Image: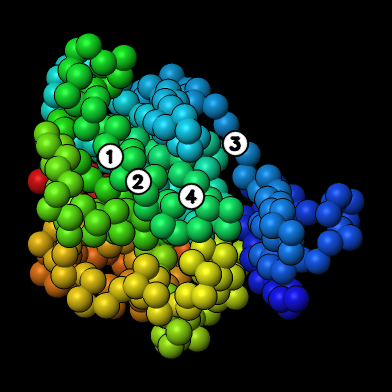
């Protein structure tokens, strides 16, 4: 029997963290993996995820000036996406860039319906003047990698179908505003890893044509990568209060997400220069948090990607600050991030 592993993690208290209580119906079974308060995995395959962040509908306040709706992408795998369309786009027929966004959560938790993502992406859509398609992909450990990467590709193939249907598509309410030749793959944490790996697959597979879609770049916010050898920031970074990612939690996520028998040197977790070669021509913007344990990994990624990449370091903030922290500093840095993303996609 596998030994139980537990990794502690805490979030901003305003998110009303609910822990799994002792009244769990599976309390008599062996827990083989746990990230405290976020996910518990039992030896029979049962998985529990407490409601750490509220899930909300696509409704938005009118003052945001953004319309949002949920759309089914693949009914067989239950993949869906939440779209964000800025109201100012009504006169921008066929001119708006589209961000295909993947949420974070270590591949194991999270949702496109989480309130923190709903708020962040609605504001990003409004301020950056772009369409956003936030993909709700399958989670590990029930669906280990590469399931999330496959879902990303499925979402892009669905986008291609909508672009070809034109005015006959039931998605014309947003597709008529979209510049399908200006697509960006984006995400934070594990979502940034998904964006990167989907881009890698697209760029290394000449047989997969997404025309008329054209991928213009990736936006990688605190991308979640790892390795067996520790970096300096993984070992010594002093974490801010209520850090969203500890080293123990990071290790647990990788154990749950990677294929059976793989370690953290698997290329999906620790890509080599050879694996990165396919995307070296593709512009990439990497958003790095100064207080993040992933800081050094993110810097290594930028160096490996070479001249096509650029990065911004956000001072004084930690992992996922833009969605999980309510401090004044985090709000200031989030506005800076939104402005940086806008500049990247509107060049």
In the rendered structure, the answer to whether residue 42 lies left or right of residue 337 reads right
Secondary structure at badge 3 equals loop
- x then y, percent, for residue 164: 17, 24
- Of callouts 4 and 1, the N-terminal one: 1
Secondary structure at badge 1 equals helix
**Residue at mark 1:** 156
Q: What separation in Å lies between label 3 and label 4 (alpha carbons)?
A: 14 Å
**Residue at mark 2:** 152
Against 263, residue 79 (above or below) is above
**Residue at mark 4:** 323
Residue at figure coordinates x 72%, y 69% from the top left: 32
Residue at figure coordinates x 76%, y 54% from the top left: 19
**Mark 2–mark 3 CB contact (< 8 Å):** no
- Of callouts 4 and 2, the N-terminal one: 2
**Residue at mark 3:** 55
Residue at figure coordinates x 45%, y 84% from the top left: 228
Secondary structure at badge 2 equals helix
**Crowd band around label 3 with a 10 angstrom C-alpha radius: few (<14), some (14–19), many (20+):** some
Figure quadrant of residue 220: bottom left
């Amino acid at each position: 029997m596998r030994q139980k592993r537990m990794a502690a993690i805490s979030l901003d208290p305003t998110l009303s963290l609910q822990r799994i209580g002792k009244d769990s119906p599976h309390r008599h079974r062996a827990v083989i993996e746990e990230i405290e308060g976020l996910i518990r995995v039992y030896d029979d395959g049962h998985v529990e995820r407490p409601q750490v962040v509220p899930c909300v509908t696509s409704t938005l306040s009118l003052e945001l000036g953004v319309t949002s709706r949920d759309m089914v992408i693949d009914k067989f795998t239950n993949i869906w996406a939440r779209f964000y369309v800025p109201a100012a786009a009504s006169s921008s027929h066929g001119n708006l860039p589209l961000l295909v966004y993947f949420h974070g959560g270590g591949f194991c938790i999270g949702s496109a319906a989480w309130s923190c993502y709903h708020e962040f992406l609605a504001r990003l859509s409004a301020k950056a003047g772009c369409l956003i398609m936030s993909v709700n992909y399958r989670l590990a450990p029930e669906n280990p990698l590469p399931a999330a990467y496959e879902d990303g590709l499925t979402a892009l193939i669905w986008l291609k179908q909508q672009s070809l249907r034109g005015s006959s598509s039931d998605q014309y309410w947003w597709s008529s505003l979209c510049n399908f030749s200006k697509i960006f793959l984006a995400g934070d944490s594990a979502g940034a890893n998904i964006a990167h790996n989907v881009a890698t697959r697209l760029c290394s597979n000449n047989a997969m044509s997404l025309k008329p879609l054209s991928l213009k770049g990736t936006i990688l916010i605190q991308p979640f990568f790892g390795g067996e050898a520790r970096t300096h920031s993984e070992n010594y970074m002093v974490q801010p209060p209520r850090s969203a990612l500890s080293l123990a939690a990071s290790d647990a996520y990788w154990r749950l997400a990677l294929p059976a028998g793989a370690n953290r040197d698997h290329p999906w977790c620790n890509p080599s220069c050879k694996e990165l070669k396919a995307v070296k021509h593709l512009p990439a913007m990497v958003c790095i948090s100064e207080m993040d344990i992933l800081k050094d990994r993110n810097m290594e990624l930028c160096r490996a990607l070479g001249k096509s990449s650029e990065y911004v370091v956000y001072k004084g903030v930690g992992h996922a600050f833009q969605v999980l922290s309510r401090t004044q500093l985090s709000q200031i840095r989030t506005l800076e991030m939104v402005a940086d993303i806008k500049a990247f996609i509107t060049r």
